[in-house]
Amino acid sequence: MIIYSIIFYHARRSSRRITPSTSNTMTTHIPNAKREMKLAQNMIMIETLYAAAGVPLLILILWQVIQVNSPPPESLYLLSMNSISVFSTLMIIMLFCTNKQVKDIALNYQHAEQQRVHRASTVNRQQQMLQVIRH
């Protein structure tokens, strides 16, 4: 959380250095406000996913501190380990979806791959038809 606060602080500070100090119109501040809002939203989503991943582990730790004599159920151990994996995957998907440049590259690659497969299947069909006609 501290690291994300530092990142947000530096992003705000750098955007204030970029804007002209002589102009007080709202139009000069809107792009930076949108950028800062997007950055804050992404950081909040990341922190929420980190917190959600840690909740089962926190419950497990608290269980062991509060009830020393009774061990937690085995399913809680499995849930805590799986939640870390699941939420890490969700975080990667969220980062992929929020990064427009990466998303555009991946979609263009997928589109080019589909066209390549379609062309190859069309060529195969044409060759098969020629073989049928020859025989």
Image (cartoon, rainbow, N blue to C red):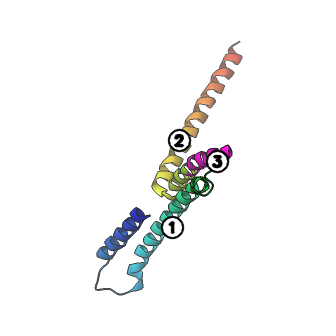
Looking at the image, residue 69 lies above or below residue 10: above
- Name the amino acid, label 1: Gln
Question: Residue 55's image quarter?
Answer: bottom right
**How crowded is the residue under tag 1: few (<14 C-alpha within 10 Å), some, or many (20+)?**
few
**How crowded is the residue under tag 3: few (<14 C-alpha within 10 Å), some, or many (20+)?**
few
Q: Earlier in the sequence, mark 1 or mark 2?
A: 1
Magenta span contains residue 75: yes
| Quadrant in the picture for the C terminus | top right
Secondary element at tag 2: helix
Magenta span contains residue 88: no
Between circles 1 and 3, the one closer to the viewer is 3
Gap in Å between the C-alphas at discs 1 and 2? Answer: 32 Å
Q: Between 66 and 48, which is closer to the camera in this rendering? A: 66
Gap in Å between the C-alphas at discs 1 and 3? Answer: 39 Å
- Name the amino acid, label 2: Ala
Looking at the image, residue 57 lies above or below residue 27: above
Q: Label 2, on which residue?
A: 112
Secondary element at tag 3: loop
Between circles 1 and 2, the one closer to the viewer is 1
Name the mark on residue 1.
Answer: none
Q: Label 3, on which residue?
A: 71
Looking at the image, residue 46 lies above or below residue 24: above
Looking at the image, residue 74 lies above or below residue 2: above
Q: Earlier in the sequence, mark 3 or mark 2?
A: 3
Span colored in magenta: 71-87
Task: Tell me, yes or no, whether the two marked residues, 3 and 2, touch with CB atoms within 8 Å.
Answer: no
Q: Where is residue 79 in the image (x, y as percent from the top left)?
A: 64, 47
Q: Where is residue 60 in the image (x, y as percent from the top left)?
A: 60, 52
Q: Label 1, on which residue?
A: 41
Q: Position of residue 112 (x, y in %)?
A: 53, 41
